[in-house]
Image: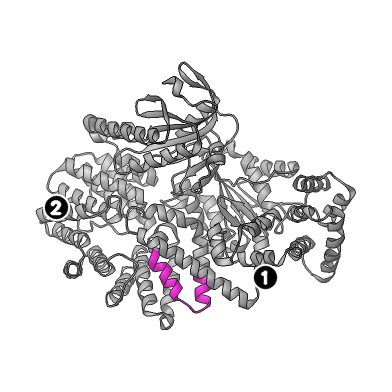
Amino acid sequence: MRGELPTGTVTFLFTDVEGSTRLLRELGAERYGDALAEHRRLIRDACAGNGGVEVDTQGDAFFIAFPAAAPALAAARQLTEALTTGPIRVRVGVHTGEALVTSDGYVGEDVHLAARVAASAHGGQVVLSGATAAIADDRELTDLGEHRLEDVDGPVAIFQLGVERYPPLKTISNTNLPRAASSFVGRERELEEVRSRIEGGGRLVTLTGPGGSGKTRVAIEAATALIPSFKAGVFWVGLASLREPALVIETIAQTLGAKNGLAEHIGERELLLLVDNFEQVIEAAPKLASLLGACPKLTLLVTSRELLRVQGELEYPVPPLAEAEAVALFCARSQLEPTAEIAELCGRLDSLPLAVELAAARTKALTPAQILERLAQRLDLLRAGRDADPRQQTLRATIEWSHDLLSEPERQLFRRLSVFAGGSTLEAAEAVCDADLDTLQSLVDKSLLRFSSGRYWMLETIREYASEQLEPRELDAVRRQHRAYMVGLAEAGAPHMHNRDESAVSARLAPDYANFRAAVSYALAAAEPDDVGRILGAVYPFFISHGHLGEVREWAEAALAARDRLSDHGLAETLMGGGEIARFAGDLDRAIELKDELTAVEGDLQRPNWRAATLADLCEIALDQGHLARARDYAEQCAAAGGGARADLCFAELALRAGDLGSAESRGLAALAELEPGAFNHACVLELLGEAARRAGDEAGAQDRFSEALRSFATLADGGGIADSLEGLSRLAAASGDGERAGRLLGAAQRLRETRGRRPIRTDLPVAAVPDAALAAGRALTLEEAVDYALRSND
């Protein structure tokens, strides 16, 4: 076999089973053995079919070598997809490098690095090193930033295959700090001063200065240097596209993956947050201060054009570059040697980093002397006529000068791209702005546009200027095209919002949340609420799981307030999305009002079998409220409308409430057979069957069903379902006499409900009597810790 091993540059693939010990306990030796054998067969088929050579296997781990990166990633994608229907999840790591082939296989640092990359992943996740990403030519890569790995010198760039969201990588220091595309020049003194403020005990350090002064870059470099000092990691939270102060805390929570309350998620963790571009949400400063007070080991590094003015804040005004540093930056970007003209030019630009970079980008067409001559006239003119911060005048003048030198096609694309909030993909830029790749690349080359992680975006300072160049007629036209694109993006995702693909599609939509917000704002401003309804009706599950429910409810209510301008179809879609959003936000009365109105609507909507589904929703809400007769009426209407599995689920729940356990089980099994595994309603049936088994005295069957339901709800990140499953397992533990376990599970469920605002589905059952200490311990668990604890056996 050794003679078949690829040589030279080789791509190594490692796999490992996540939670093998726990799976062995849950499945038992025989079932686990069968699952492991099937897992081995699927991995070997996927790798061999893509030209991989099996180097080694130990226990449940594989080491496979490929002659190129593309087939390795194809195998990784194939094997993870093949394993999704079984109980086993594997973490997969891929790295490309050189290794020595010996009689025992491969030897070398790249083999070691590949294994460490794999160990950083989670079950179902495929991660790859920057070396592989650079040659992979795969458009479905997500940049996870630089990470430090055990026994590996220096940070390692790690990417993820696909866009699904996973917890932070299991590396020495977790971070999502952006990786700059260009080198960092100078600023040694500033970096040292920022670091010393934090290392000296400062817990809120605010870097101030005008746009383009280099605040963000200094903050990122300082935060990168501080990674080893924070055990729980260093994370960047960008607020450039945000305008609502009320959304700041929720945005931070989403960045960190906090599902149990932000302060609770951070707790005692040693964490550094870099909160970038705070000036437009400055009213949220007190909430940031409160978060700092609630988390004793949290440190905040903030960039803002103005101070937060809260207790404990330390200001660091970011100065212009030193003269020598400005010249070095200009020369690094232009690839020119220093001259007197360059030094004078940098001085005229007040040594502002962005202004220097914009000027350096022009050296492909003009000499430094020509740039100096042309730019000096504009600077002198503006300084004579503006009553503003001179540094801001200089920057604006530099942007304006760079803009004036653009060709007309470049100017048109430049101003039109400002319609995007949070950037855009190539496809979006083409559709909305009639962009072409050459012009986009030209704007990138001129430093007016940035490109990273597959998206084009502007610094907020430049975007503000670009938006000012849109005349009203063109502005209306571009906003209309932007709305149309976002509506199309939402409607393309609609067919996948009610099956097992929901999580993956929602993750792909997540980078465009700010663009959805902008599209809704544009639609309401143009008095065209139909677009709001079409977006909400298409992907309301995405907004429920990834959005800010308070904000999204406002969108729905604003559209409904303009119902005289809604078409029949637009009204129906708004009722559809608005009703579900109100339901998950906890306003059941409003949800009923909207859904009742929806049932009288004629026509087709984007939700599959929407009329029956709406009646099933109303049945479930009535059950939540304890109105059994009303719930039965809705269930019968659902069945008459062809509700199928949803009607079976409704009748199963009604039978369970009536004590008819046989009917509850048979109806539940009928629904389970029709529903797709991994879908939300499939998980709901599992929980119901668990409760039916518990009431029938089948403890083992109940344990299995509740555990299955918990895994499914956790995958969907559905807090209400997780809490329902935890409570079911808590009742089992209480019945077996394990008050400690029962209390911990119940406490975790109660805390989750408080943060998610979801009522328990089993409102007809008494709460188990548990020790107060156990209840408190359960409330202190994070969501991930609670799920992990619940899935352990009772030993």
**Considering depth in this image, is 26 or 258 the residue closer to the camera?**
26
Residue at 59% from the left image edge and 39% from the top image edge: 227
Q: Nearer the viewer, residue 695 or 484?
A: 484
Say whether residue 429 is visible.
yes
- Residue 201, located in which quarter of the rendered image? top right
Q: Position of residue 40 (x, y in %)?
A: 32, 31
What residue is shown with label 2? 665
Circle 2: residue type = Glu
Choose between 670 and 20: the one closer to the eye. Answer: 670
Tell me if residue 214 comes above or below residue 621 in the rendering: above
Magenta-highlighted residues:
520-538
Residue beneath disc 1: 468
Tell me if 138 is positioned left or right of 624 in this view. Answer: right
Residue type marked 1: Glu
Q: Quadrant of the N terminus?
A: top left
Which is closer to the viewer, label 1 or label 2?
1
In the image, farthest residue toward the top: 103
Residue 146: x %, y % from top left: 57, 40
Please give the name of the residue rendered at 33% of the width and 52% of the height, measured from the top-left corner. Answer: 500
User: Badge 1: how crowded within 10 Å, few (<14), some, or many (20+)?
Assistant: few
User: Dot 2: what SS?
Assistant: helix
Tag 2 or tag 1, which sits nearer the N-term? 1
Left or right of 265 on screen, residue 738: left
